[in-house]
Amino acid sequence: MTRRIYSRRDIGKFGLVAAATGIAAPYLNIRAAYARDAKLVFWLQPNFNKVADDLLVEQAKEYARLKGLSGNDLQIEVVPGGEVAKRMAAALEVGAPPDVTRANEEDLTKWGVAGHLLDVTPIVNEMKGREGGINEASLPLAMMNGQIFGAPMGIAANAAHVRADKFKEAGYDGLPKTWEEFIEASKKVTKPPFYAYGMALGLVPSDSLGDVMSVVSAYGGNLIDEKNRPALQSDATVTAFKLINTMYNDAKIIPRGALSWDNSGNNKAFQSGQVAYALNPTSIYSSLIADKSPFLDATILERPPGGPAGRFSTASTDYYSVFKKSPNPELAMGLIQHFMKPENYSRFIVEAGGRYLPIYPAQLKDPFWTSKPAFAGLLEAARSARSNYAPGKLTPALSEIVNRSMVVEEVQNMLVKGKDPARAVADAHKTMVEVYKRLGEPT
């Protein structure tokens, strides 16, 4: 009898089938022991900037050479951010996760609470010892039971990317300060196939939720309260949902196809000159720099429009994490340390063109940041930024709700199926409560 030695890629494919069909996977678990065909496996999530992605590949290969690894000992797999949650669920099911990957706040919470991640406190302590230290505000979310499960690698501050030339043509000096004023201006800016607002509305975490919450927070609504209980149902949230419905169905300032976008949809729409405004981490702006875009000089970075409760931007932190299943944890942690060496990290941050604010505050003194007027708007947005989960914090229940796009699904029901905004809010809140109860969290 011939026994096949399954590769990690094979196991991943089988895991996806098992996850999709509900088939039990004891056979796959037996094969998981054979899944390792490299000493170090790194899942690279694209930064929407090929130069930055290529640099990470170069740095990973440099680290492999320093460690005396052969070409086959390092496996780099490109996994788009929108696919990570499903791909990782399948990989964990068969015991074959990568050694290292970038983790957003939702995934870090989910994987950490489930016990899949290794403590990376030594890496973080080393980072703290660098000149100027690190942004300490990035650490609380990564800390669980006295351990740190993610080394912070960048602050993604959402900024309003604005085609100032288009709003000027419509008679405005810049992005209007309130959502009501924005809608009126956008009616003049929108001339299909060009639209004013590239609002992410697809069922892919987590850009769409960020866009929805940028409106909800302006009117005083929140996903959760200060005790981490579901708090979506409120008059403020209903008002915001009505406004989103007006933008999409009445004013028609959002592209129809936005409902099917993945996390790259609003990037591509702005980069290709199809929309005048998109809320996003500065992966959009960095791509304009890297591509020498004709829209670069016309693009400014701002805070989103506001409302009665204020004018807020949002910010989140991304992390590098190591999985417990890694057969060579020292090698995996060493890769993160290599990425986060100030000289390597500074080069990545600059090559990424502002994709992240640096986790080392001292690097903000670099001429890259001080010489570009647009970054003044980014830093202002970052200073006023709040989490999508304020005034509470991310928990396993909320992580599931975000990753399954449960709130955005009700937004789509309102926009496409005509569900009353108040009913859409109530149903989204009810779904949140059900998840919280199932996972034993307070409601």
Image (cartoon, grey):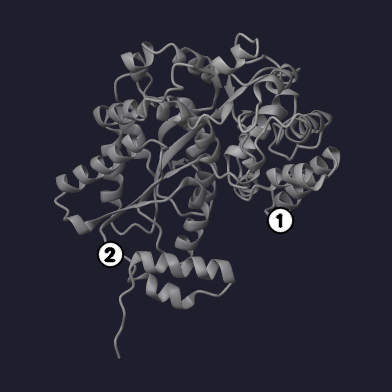
Mark 2 neighbour class, 10 Å CA radius: few under 14, some 14 to 19, many 20 or more: some
Toward the bottom, the furthest residue is 1
Q: Nearer the viewer, mark 2 or mark 1?
A: 2
Mark 1 neighbour class, 10 Å CA radius: few under 14, some 14 to 19, many 20 or more: few
**In the figure, 53 relative to 403: above or below?**
above
Q: Which of the labelled discs sits on residue 438, or is there none?
A: 1
State the residue in front, 390 or 74. 74
Q: Residue at (58%, 71%) from the top-left corner?
A: 21
In terms of secondary structure, where does tag 1 sit? helix
Residue 306, given in percent of the width and then of the height, sits at 69, 19
**In the figure, 304 relative to 240: above or below?**
above
Q: Quadrant of residue 366?
A: top left
Left or right: where 308 falls relative to 64: right
Q: Residue at (61%, 8%) from the top-left corner?
A: 173
Total marks shown come to 2
State the residue in front, 395 or 50. 50
The quarter of the picture where the N terminus appears is: bottom left
Residue 443 can be seen, yes or no: no
Q: Of the residues shown, which amino acid type is indicated by label 1?
A: Arg
**In the figure, 420 relative to 72: above or below?**
above
Q: Of the residues shown, which amino acid type is indicated by label 2?
A: Asp
In terms of secondary structure, where does tag 2 sit? loop
Residue 251, given in percent of the width and then of the height, sits at 76, 29
Residue 147 can be seen, yes or no: yes
Distance between the Cα atoms at labels 2 and 1?
A: 38 Å
Label 2: which residue? 37
Residue 246, given in percent of the width and then of the height, sits at 78, 31
Q: Residue at (24%, 40%) from the top-left corner?
A: 59
